[in-house]
Image (spheres, rainbow, N blue to C red):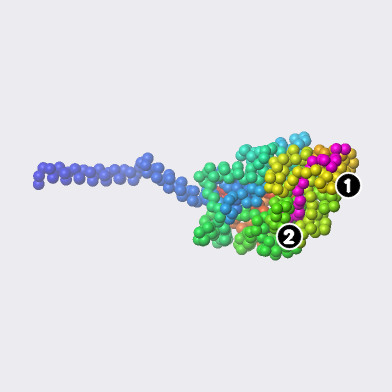
């Protein structure tokens, strides 16, 4: 054997021996590179172990997602619509909170939110008893006591909520919105969506319908959903259901529980209710017949018989607006609850049968316009309101406005019992045929459903026996038992914020067990 071959064999032997020693050494002590791969692997396993599923991208779902992401939890949000926001993004009057630094009067002087909510809920609440009564009290207590915290939470996220109005059924101004032109619902939703989309922990899939929630071994552990491709898929993890109500389910749940509302227009797009997703796993339902018909939805002159209406924000009445019948007369205290105002309108002669509509005009003066100009300008742009003079409304309307102006100035008592007139500024001695007003035709429309699945103060979904169903939470309009027979304006966004955050916090606790 040549000297060259011998040297080659020795070199190979040394390489094998050294390689063996090195591999043994690496098996005992981790190199920086192996540590990096192990860390990534553990991080991936950890993220897979801590994933939460949210169904619905209104404020309830977004509040839950924000809470989860802030605690390092991966979130997958499934939304059936093409864009996020649900009905929350359309909310125009604001979000309730008390006490807050933005409210008028002495600091923290609003102590009546709880009692106003109970009074508004009516006989549904007052006639309840036992465990159901205690559960309702806890839900309302949580709603009210967490309200100022929600305002602070949103403000810290950059949402302007500095303007406060008093709406119907409230004894104190507590409905917050921004000072600019952006409606409160859009402002809140867009801020949360922007924040969430910047996080690598957040994933949203739109155009996806959840078809089933699975419960195995006594707990919920996954959902089945279908997106645009039609393929059924599954996603595993604890589930927060924030899918909204059934006010747009005219031929389904609405027809089942409130057939008397057949033919009414709605402020909701047509879509099926989602409560059956939860009743299929044993969830209890409550207050399903309690449906809110909002007294003021605009009748669009360009399409007056459309079954879908655009809401006339309640703050228009809260800021001083009044309602006139087709005779030019007031017929109700406009600051009463939505139910009372709706009942007063529907007691008037019916204007149209299909859809059912009444001839009512919402009238505002320049003072109201100054304090709600962003809303009114938008409605004028949409052709839902117009600027005119009192002479165009007729002699009876002129006399009615003159009398209303006397009451708003405190010169006489309002015969309908109104005591709060917002920013109405037209004086009785200034009322004339040339007085400028802003007018829009309105009619009652199905707006909100107070009924839904039963939860406790931790947002845990309860079964027929009152026991929690492990692994599933619910928040927002999909829930029942919060508002009884009437929801106060501004409490829809609040409910979503309060119980969305609670659901998120409870899922964090659940995953940490």
Q: Residue furthest right?
A: 412
Name the spot of residue 126 as percent of width and height, x first.
79, 55
Magenta residues span 429-454
Residue 96 appears in the rendering: no
What residue is pinned by disc 2? 355
Q: Residue at x 84, y 50 (%)?
A: 328
In the picture, residue 161 is in which quadrant?
top right
In the picture, residue 112 is in which quadrant?
top right
Q: Earlier in the sequence, mark 2 or mark 1?
A: 2
Q: Are marks 2 and 1 in contact (CB under 8 Å)?
A: no
What residue is pinned by disc 1? 415
Magenta includes 445?
A: yes
451 left or right, relative to 404: left
Q: Residue at x 52, y 56 (%)?
A: 235
Find numbered disc 1 in the image and state the secondary structure of the residue it sits on.
loop
Which one is in front in this view, the residue at disc 2 or the one at disc 1?
A: 2
């Amino acid at each position: 054997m040549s000297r060259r071959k011998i040297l080659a064999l020795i070199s190979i032997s040394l390489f094998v021996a050294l390689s063996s020693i090195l591999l043994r050494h690496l098996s005992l002590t981790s190199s920086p590179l192996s540590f990096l791969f192990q860390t990534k692997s553990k991080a991936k396993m950890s993220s897979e172990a801590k994933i939460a599923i949210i169904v619905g991208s209104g404020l309830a779902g977004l509040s839950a997602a924000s809470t989860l992401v802030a605690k390092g939890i991966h979130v997958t949000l499934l939304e059936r619509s093409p864009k996020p926001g649900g009905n929350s993004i359309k909310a125009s009057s604001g979000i309730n909170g008390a006490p807050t630094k933005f409210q008028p009067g002495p600091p923290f002087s609003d102590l009546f939110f709880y009692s106003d909510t109970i009074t508004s809920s009516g006989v549904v609440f007052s006639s309840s008893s036992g465990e159901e009564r205690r559960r309702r009290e806890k839900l309302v207590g949580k709603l009210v006591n967490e309200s100022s915290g929600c305002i602070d939470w949103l403000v810290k996220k950059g949402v302007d909520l500095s303007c406060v109005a008093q709406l119907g059924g409230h004894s104190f101004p507590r409905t917050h919105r921004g000072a600019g032109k952006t409606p409160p619902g859009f402002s809140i939703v867009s801020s949360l969506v922007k924040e969430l989309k910047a996080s690598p922990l957040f994933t949203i899939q739109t155009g996806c319908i959840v078809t089933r929630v699975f419960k195995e071994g006594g707990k919920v552990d996954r959902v089945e959903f279908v997106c645009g491709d039609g393929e059924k898929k599954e996603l595993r993890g604890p589930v927060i259901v924030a899918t909204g109500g059934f006010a747009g389910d005219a031929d389904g749940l609405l027809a089942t529980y409130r057939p008397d509302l057949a033919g009414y227009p709605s402020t909701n797009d047509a879509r099926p209710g989602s409560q059956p997703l939860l009743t299929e796993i044993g969830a209890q339902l409550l207050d399903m017949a309690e449906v809110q018909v909002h007294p003021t939805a605009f009748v669009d002159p360009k399409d007056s018989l459309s079954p879908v209406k655009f809401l006339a924000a309640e703050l228009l009445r809260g800021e001083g607006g009044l309602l006139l019948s087709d005779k030019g007369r007031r017929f109700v205290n406009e600051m009463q609850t939505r139910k009372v105002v709706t009942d007063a309108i529907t007691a008037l002669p019916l204007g149209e049968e299909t859809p059912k509509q009444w001839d009512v005009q919402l009238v505002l003066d320049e003072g109201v316009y100054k304090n709600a100009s962003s809303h009114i300008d938008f409605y004028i742009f949409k052709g839902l309101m117009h600027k005119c003079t009192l002479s165009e409304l007729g002699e009876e309307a002129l006399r009615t406005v003159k009398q209303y102006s006397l009451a708003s100035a405190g010169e006489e008592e309002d015969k309908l019992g109104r005591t709060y007139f917002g920013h109405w500024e037209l004086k009785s001695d200034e009322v004339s045929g040339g007085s400028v007003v802003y007018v829009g035709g309105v009619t009652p429309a199905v707006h909100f459903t107070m009924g839904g699945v039963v939860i406790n103060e931790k947002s845990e979904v309860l079964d027929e026996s009152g026991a929690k169903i492990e692994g599933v939470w619910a928040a927002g309009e999909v829930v029942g038992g919060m508002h009884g027979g009437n929801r106060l304006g501004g409490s829809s966004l609040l409910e979503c914020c309060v119980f969305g955050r609670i659901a998120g916090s409870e899922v964090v606790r659940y995953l940490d067990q």
